[in-house]
Image: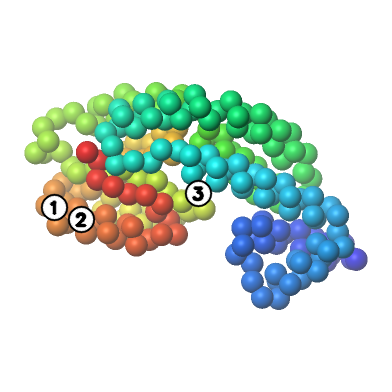
Amino acid sequence: MSANVHDAVDELLPWYANGTLEGEERDRVERHLAECEVCREEMALLRDVDHVRSEIVAATPIVPDALGKTLARIDEWEHTRRPSLAARVRALAARVFDVPTVPRLVLVAQFALILVLGSGLVLSRLKEPTITTLSGGSGASAAPRLTVVFEATATEESIRQALQKVGGTLVSGPSAAGVYLVALPKAGNDAKAVDAAIAALRENRSVIRFVELEP
């Protein structure tokens, strides 16, 4: 096995792990994994990190509820979930930062996401003053706002493009649960215009995981 082949396959492992690799590249990775123990270990680590991230995301309460109730549910979720996940996250940290190969950058990025999602209410509490300020004023003059959760794989550019299409602006977030508040133009107070903006965002499934009008 040449070093060039090993390095080429090593770079493809993150995409193979998340199931987006196809055709000849997928076959090449599978052939290499059959004979390379190092890459098999990296694959196992990639999948462990993604599994923990998915578990945290799936368990995070995402509901079209008032922000105070949402934060209360996050409190309850963290008290019940964090102890069992904390040990796994610490163990993954030791493994992630011990990987010397190309997938390390992907692992570090995914591990950072795990820390953001499972870090507790620190971020949400820091964001509360901003949220409170933005919610002030009369309901008639305030711009309609959406509760939005972006896909973990969404890039900054894709998020910006998705929001530009509906005239949306990020005003707060993320909370500990990864929730953002997005303001629509004041002219969008018309119910039909708001519904159209929500529908347009929901169609962009590669970028938007959840979107609902803020109560």
Residue under the point 61% across and 46% down: 51
Q: Quadrant of the C terminus?
A: top left
Residue 161, position in %: x, y? 37, 57
- Residue 119, numbered label: none
From the viewer's side, name the closer residue of 8 and 49. 49
Crowdedness near tag 3: few (<14), some (14–19) or many (≥20) residues, C-alpha within 10 Å: some
Question: Disc 1 marks which residue?
Answer: 191
SS for dot 3:
loop
Marks 1 and 2 in Cβ contact (< 8 Å): yes
Q: Amino acid at mark 1?
A: Ala
Mark 3 — residue? Answer: 152
Mark 2 highlights which residue?
Answer: 195
* Three-letter amino acid code of the residue under disc 3: Ala
Q: Image height check: is 136 above or below 36?
A: above
User: Quadrant of the rendered structure where residue 165 is?
Assistant: bottom left
Which x, y percent locates residue 95?
A: 75, 38
In primary-sequence order, the first of circles 1 and 3 is 3
